[in-house]
């Protein structure tokens, strides 16, 4: 039994305001005895809206997991709906590592028969479909909708983001005849309660879902299996730009020297 649980919530982009928003959303649901540390990489894209940016962000996720391991963190949440670097992070961490897309899909099916996803930009919908299929939720999801609001505009009070996302969620419920909506971006985390009140169905934020699930897994004494695929990576040279991340004789890579 863990009396004090440390969860590191990693915002894979480098926008401090979004990291702060994600941290607040996680702390609201963390509960007694759970300490939430919201962090971001020291380098990487300001937002993640392409495969290129997701690949860059994955390195930053690994950086923060490595630092968390040194600090004794119990569990991690990767707070981007594309779940960047999730598999690699599971190879490094001693505790569970949860992505917000996978956690949100699980939560949605616990409170509804079918759901739809409302994400930010249409170009990210393919990744959402890919993850739905990978995690086994493709049949439970009716559709993926985009409200065409850039990620960084979600935190701008003058952008009308809340109204646009609410309208997209309402339209999804009516068009798809679903019982719940999953928000497909961590930047939408602060909207959850207001949208749910407005449209009358459960609205699932993956940051909240992953944080609560992570704490529950730690309390249950469960962690990622290290038997096969998620075993620590074998030591080997990594020449060039990422040389500081090479696996040496331990299960975690050394960080580049600043």
Image (cartoon, rainbow, N blue to C red):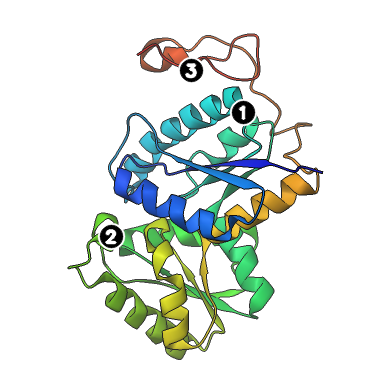
Q: Secondary structure at mark 3?
A: helix
Kindly identify which residue carries mark 2: 155
Q: Earlier in the sequence, mark 1 or mark 3?
A: 1
Residue 23 vs 125, above or below: the answer is above
Q: Position of residue 140 (x, y in %)?
A: 61, 74
> What residue is drawn where x is 73% and y is 45%?
218
**Which residue occupies the foreground of this view, 121 or 47?**
47
Q: Position of residue 27 (x, y in %)?
A: 52, 54
| Closer mark to the observer between disc 2 and disc 1 | 2
Crowding around mark 1 (Cα neighbors within 10 Å: few <14, some 14 to 19, many 20+) is many
Q: Secondary structure at mark 1?
A: helix
Q: Secondary structure at mark 2?
A: helix
| Closer mark to the observer between disc 3 and disc 2 | 2
> What residue is drawn where x is 35% and y is 14%?
258
Q: CA distance from mark 2 to mark 1?
A: 32 Å
> What residue is drawn where x is 39% and y is 33%?
41
Q: Earlier in the sequence, mark 2 or mark 1?
A: 1
User: Seen in the image, is 243 located left or right of residue 1?
Assistant: left
Name, please, the residue furthest toward the left: 158
Q: CA distance from mark 1 to mark 3?
A: 11 Å
Crowding around mark 2 (Cα neighbors within 10 Å: few <14, some 14 to 19, many 20+) is some
Kindly identify which residue carries mark 1: 92
Residue 245 is tagged as: 3
């Amino acid at each position: 039994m863990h009396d004090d649980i440390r969860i590191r919530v990693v915002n894979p982009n480098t926008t401090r305001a979004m990291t702060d928003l994600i941290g607040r959303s996680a702390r609201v649901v963390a509960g007694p005895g759970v300490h939430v540390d919201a962090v971001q990489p020291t380098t990487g894209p300001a937002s993640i809206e392409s495969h290129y940016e997701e690949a860059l962000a994955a390195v930053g996720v690994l950086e923060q997991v490595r630092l968390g391991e040194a600090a004794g963190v119990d569990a991690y949440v990767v707070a981007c709906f594309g779940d960047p670097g999730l598999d690699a992070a599971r190879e490094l961490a001693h505790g569970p590592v949860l992505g917000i897309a996978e956690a949100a899909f699980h939560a949605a099916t616990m409170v509804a028969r079918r759901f739809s996803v409302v994400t930010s930009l249409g170009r990210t919908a393919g990744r959402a479909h890919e993850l739905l299929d990978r995690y086994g939720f493709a049949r439970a999801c009716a559709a993926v909708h985009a409200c065409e609001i850039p990620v960084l505009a979600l935190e701008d009070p003058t952008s009308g983001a809340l109204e646009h996302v609410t309208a997209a969620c309402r339209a999804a419920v009516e068009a798809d005849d679903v019982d719940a909506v999953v928000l497909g971006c961590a930047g939408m985390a602060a909207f959850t309660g207001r949208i749910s009140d407005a449209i009358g169905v459960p609205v699932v934020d993956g940051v909240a879902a992953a944080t609560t699930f992570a704490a529950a897994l730690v309390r249950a004494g469960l962690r990622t299996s290290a038997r096969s695929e998620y075993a620590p990576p074998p030591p080997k040279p990594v020449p060039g730009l990422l040389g500081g991340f090479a696996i040496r004789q331990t299960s975690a890579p050394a960080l580049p020297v600043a």
